[in-house]
Amino acid sequence: MPIDVKKISKILGSGLLVVCGPQIVSGMLAEWIKNVKVSNVSDWVVHDKRVWDHVPDEWKDKLRIWGPRLGDLKWLDTEWVLKECRDANPSVVSLILNWPDAAAWISKNIADLKKEILPVKEKVPQGAICEKQ
């Protein structure tokens, strides 16, 4: 049964998302990775395709809405992703562990994913003057 992040967060508040963020993302990841084939990953690595482009739109929307409430996402790294995917799709995990190009590709895509779901904070130069319009 899929987790309705929106419903949970309304009931318990966004603090739950920081605490349970890894478990929520783990469930989404496990559901998605089940349908990914080794041939898909091989193609994505060889052609340097973005994982984000292959995530269902409904999940992208949820991640963009709730991602900023998941904290800093320091826990979301290659080791965590591979551990969470191991049971759902051991063949894909084996490919990534045994192919250095795939390992580099997944690390790059995790960084890309974080950029997609965390808001970009603009830096204001020190001493800058902001004018009201």
Image: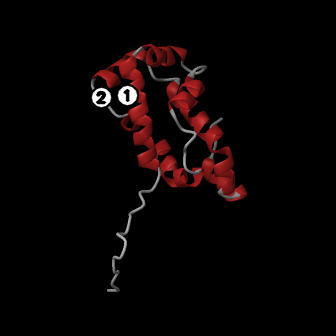
- Compared with 3, 89 (above or below) is above
- Does residue 115 show up? yes
- Compared with 8, 45 (above or below) is above
Residue at image location 34% in from the left, 81% down from the top = 129
| Amino acid type assigned to the residue bearing label 1 in the image | Trp
Q: What label sits on residue 92 in the rendered view?
A: none
SS state under label 1: helix
Disc 1 target residue: 105
Residue at image location 43% in from the left, 41% down from the top = 113
Going by the image, does 46 lie left or right of 39?
A: left
Say which quadrant the N terminus sits in.
top right
Please tell me which residue lies in front, 11 or 126. 126
Q: What label sits on residue 48 in the rendered view?
A: 2
Splitting the image into 4 quarters, where does residue 44 fall? top left
- Compared with 102, 6 (above or below) is below
Q: CA distance from mark 1 to mark 2?
A: 7 Å
Label 1 vs label 2, nearer the camera = 1
Please tell me which residue lies in front, 129 or 118. 129
